[in-house]
Amino acid sequence: MTQLTVEKEQLVRPALTVSGISKTYGTGAEARQILGDITFEAYDNETVSIVGPSGAGKTTLLRCLAGLLEPTSGTVHLRDQLVTSPPEQLAVVFQDYSRSLMPWLTVQANVELPLRGKAGLTKTERHERARESLESVGLGSSGKLYPWQLSGGMQQRVAIARALAYQPTVLLMDEPFASVDAQTRSDLEDLTHRIKARYNMTILLVTHDIEESVYLGDRVIVMSGTPTTVTEIVPVDIPYPRDQITTKSTREFAELRAHVLSQIRTTTG
Amino acid sequence: MTAAAGRERSGGAARRAPHRRTRGRMSSIITVIAALAAWEVSSRLGILPNSVFPSMSQTATRLGELLIDPLFWAAFVETVVSWIVGVLIAAAIGIPVGMVLGRVAFAYRSTRLLVDFLRTIPSIAVIPLITLLFGATMQMKIILIVYGAVWPLVLQMIYGVRDTDKVLVDTVHSYKVSKWRAAASVLFPSALPYLVTGMRISIVVGLLLAISAEMLGSAPGIGLELALAQTGGDLSLTYAYIVFIGLVAVLVDILLRRLSRVVLFWHASVREEKP
Amino acid sequence: MSTEAIVTATRARAGKTPKRRALTIITEIWLPILLFAIWWFASADSTSIYFPSLQSILEALGEMLTQRFASDIVPSLQNLGMGLLIAIVSGIAIGALLGLSPGLYRAFQPLLEFMRAIPGVALLPVMLVIFGIGSSMKIAVIAFGAFWPIMMNTVDGVLSVDGMTREVSKSYRLSRFDHVLRVVLPAASPQIISGMRLSVSLSVILIVASEYIASTEGIGYIELMSARMYQMDTMWASLLLLGVLGYVANVLFRYVEHVVLRWHRGVRGNTQGGQG
């Protein structure tokens, strides 16, 4: 589904609106601007990849979107609601699964943990929801294990399941597959496709991998170096279902990949 | 400041550290003054019953008197001498024993239960026995301190030697260095952080035991003076002694932290702690 | 490491041959048995007042365990348990509070370091004045002495909780209650437990000390009284009993630690074996 069709159906505000946010650390001579005036939207059921050279303020941007960090200027809206603290309709999958999962909780308990705060959810419902989302990431039988008993890829699946069980309208993923091996990585990329098909969510994926950004995104936002700004927003009109082999071998895919790469090259000089 | 600096490792806090630290120091000075003032005011107002808590000023006056009293210093010397001698003997026994136990697997396994049992006996429980055998003397105190302070050293040396980098040991062996040279050049330095920890524990335990032996076994020293002050019903003097002992303990703690940083300047844990 | 790999690794560790296991046990117990035998035979015909025969010591121990169990051993254990319990609960609660508000902690730090540094034994005279002779005084001494290591370690543990862990908690909007109880305290538990280990040893020392100085009951009281009356077999028996008590407290504690910190060992074992 492309951006245009979404816009036609959806006359209310986009799922996520980022207007002119910037972030500066420190003051006076020590001031360091990380983000400079970033504006974009993400629509319902759309996957937006945010790609840029490493060291760019991608993670800073994501933390601003998640309400974990206050931007120096500009605003972030989730639908109509101004984001000032972590919103309820938003879940984050962090890069470092070994630190983002609680090693003292079982896999099941890890997924259930954020659900404890959700109002009107009974213990059985919580349990059921967690089990369901674990199943949807292919870990239905691992609930009783501890995260450290699983491989890296499986741990990241748990982190994804935790986000899914939270049932957000916007899912932020911060370099989610950067710490796993290549095979696991493509498995997890395809899992992301399946999730997108199954749940109605807007996914924001921060990555430094150009191929991944094109393969997973409906649009790719190319970021520049420091201070980070939006260089270009590239629409990816590759139809679904996408496949690791056939999609990636199309001319379209290759052209988009080359285009994104050239955009990043120009910004880093 | 060592510990506090080491603790401030997380993210954004480090950026503002210098500013925060001065503010932290200011606020802690204010807190100490406020606590002392609260003590004084509440005992004047009778919130703290005078039968149980003397006022801050009374205690401070008695402490001041103590500090110019030669008899007090004589008692303190008694305590310090047994403390130092005890810890030194404990080190002379504990370090080599720990190194051997750490190095020789058979010796370690054979003595494991014994060491475990002996070190968990609450050390002051031997006071009645050694008081009978040696009387209320310096000798008795030293024996108690040696007994209590030797275990941390033995254990830390075992951990330290066992933790020595296997590669390092192999390197030394491949150069056919004699066993003694190997012990001196590799085992000892790499076990040094553990030794420093062991010494720190032993020194703290040593003070506790010196005072315990004096209080409970009536050997001369400030512990005995403290017990006498209480039995004599002189409450402010009792508090003055406790405050003094607390100050000594804090001072020793700060000194030991500083010292261990100097000794272990090359060690990673210390390097990390530097702001 | 995969799940299967871990299972195999555990199996390999546990799967020692019975022969080797027997050998391990023999290496561990030959020396204690030998020393026990030497003590037994060397002291058999002892005429020294200070060193009675091991046989008579063990007889005295048996007598103590049967006749003075309710009157002396139980009170000692009760006071110990009560004091420790107070120290653990208040130490963790106050430690968590201070750890979660670093400004407050920094303000109180010098005061706390001073209080912590006072050897618990030195407070006996004051506690005696405040609480008089009795259980409450002993409990107070133990609670005060055992409080500091737990409290300070809790603060340390809470302050060193990983920033990422905090962010997860924040971004998923955990309630304050869940954040403290299910995230912060478990994350700090390795440090809390090591503080508790120190506190357990300390509290055994403090119960003995308080029973020496002002008491009419307890194992420490029996020991001191029998020493004063030159009933050396009873004195040795109570010394032995205190040793066993200290040892058992330690073993129990190690078991608790083993269970509570299973995840911690799991994580460490995993990172040492390399991630993947």
Image (cartoon, coloured by chain):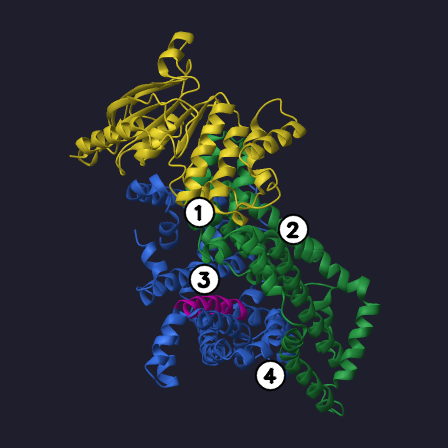
Chain colours: A yellow, B blue, C green
Task: Please name whichever residue, A82 or A225, is drawn nearer the observer in this view of the structure.
Answer: A225
Q: Is residue C60 magenta?
A: no
In the rendered view of the protein, which quadrant contains the C terminus of chain A? top left
Q: What quarter of the picture does the N terminus of chain A occupy?
A: top left
Q: Front-most of B58 and B53?
A: B53
Q: Is residue B194 magenta?
A: yes
Residue C211, x across and y down, in percent: 68, 64
Q: Crowding near pointer 2: few (<14 within 10 Å), some, many (20+)?
A: some
- Image height of A7 relative to C142, above or below: above
Q: Which residues are magenta?
A: B193-209
* Labels 1 & 4 near each other (Cβ < 8 A): no
SS label for mark 2: helix
Specify the quadrant of the image occupied by residue B166: bottom left
Residue C160: image tag: 1
Q: Which residue is mark 3?
A: B249
Tell me the chain of label 4: B
Q: Residues within 10 Å of mark 1 (few under 14, many from 20)?
A: some
Within-10-Å neighbours for mark 3: few <14, some 14–19, many 20+:
many
Q: Is residue A174 visible?
A: yes
Q: Amino acid at mark 3?
A: Ala
Which residue has dot 2 on it? C85
Residue annotated with mark 4 = B134
State which mark lies toward you, 2 or 1: 1
Of callouts 2 and 1, the N-terminal one: 2
